Amino acid sequence: MGLGKMSYEDALGCADRLKQNSDDLRLHLVDLKREMESLDEVLKSRGANQVSETYTAIDSDMEKSPDKINEFNLYIRDAVASYRAADEQLKQEGK
């Protein structure tokens, strides 16, 4: 059985990729934050201030993204576990 047209293994593979993307995004965001902090130390102009202010305004939203992606990974894993358990119960009842 599976989740619609997707097998359980395919769904778990998707969850694995989401987890990896979440981890990768988190690392990229750390790098971006480090770069922005180093720019703040070097660039002193109205344009640089505008870039810094814009980054600061969206930073907290960006930091939440990896967690949101990982939440969906966990949801997929929970759904697969629930569906597998239901399938197994149906098989047992059908015997």
Image (cartoon, grey):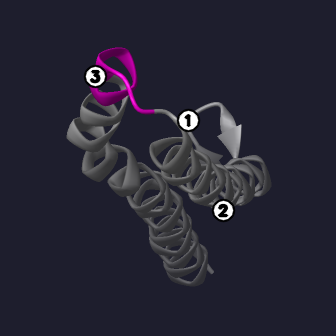
Q: Nearer the viewer, residue 71 or 67?
A: 67
Whether residues under marks 2 and 1 lie with C-beta atoms below 8 angstroms apart, the answer is no
Q: Earlier in the sequence, mark 1 or mark 3?
A: 1
Tell me the mark number nearer the camera, choosing from 1 and 3: 3
Image mark count:
3
For mark 1, what is the residue? Answer: 4
For mark 3, what is the residue? Answer: 50
Measured in 3D between alpha carbons, the distance from the residue under mark 2 to the one under mark 1, in whole angstroms, is: 28 Å
Q: Secondary structure at mark 3?
A: helix
Q: Secondary structure at mark 1?
A: loop
Q: Amino acid at mark 2?
A: Asp
Magenta: main secondary structure? helix
Q: Amino acid at mark 1?
A: Gly
How far across and down, in percent of the image, does residue 14 sit? Answer: 70, 47
Highlighted range, magenta: 44-50
How far across and down, in percent of the image, does residue 39 sit? Answer: 54, 41
**Is 59 above or below relative to 9?**
above
**Is 20 above or below relative to 84?**
above
Q: Earlier in the sequence, mark 2 or mark 3?
A: 2
- Res 79 visible: yes
Residue in the image at 45% along x and 72% along y = 82
The local crowd at label 2, few if under 14, some if 14 to 19, many if 20 or more residues have their Cα within 10 Å, is some
Is residue 20 covered in magenta? no
**Is 29 above or below relative to 54?**
below
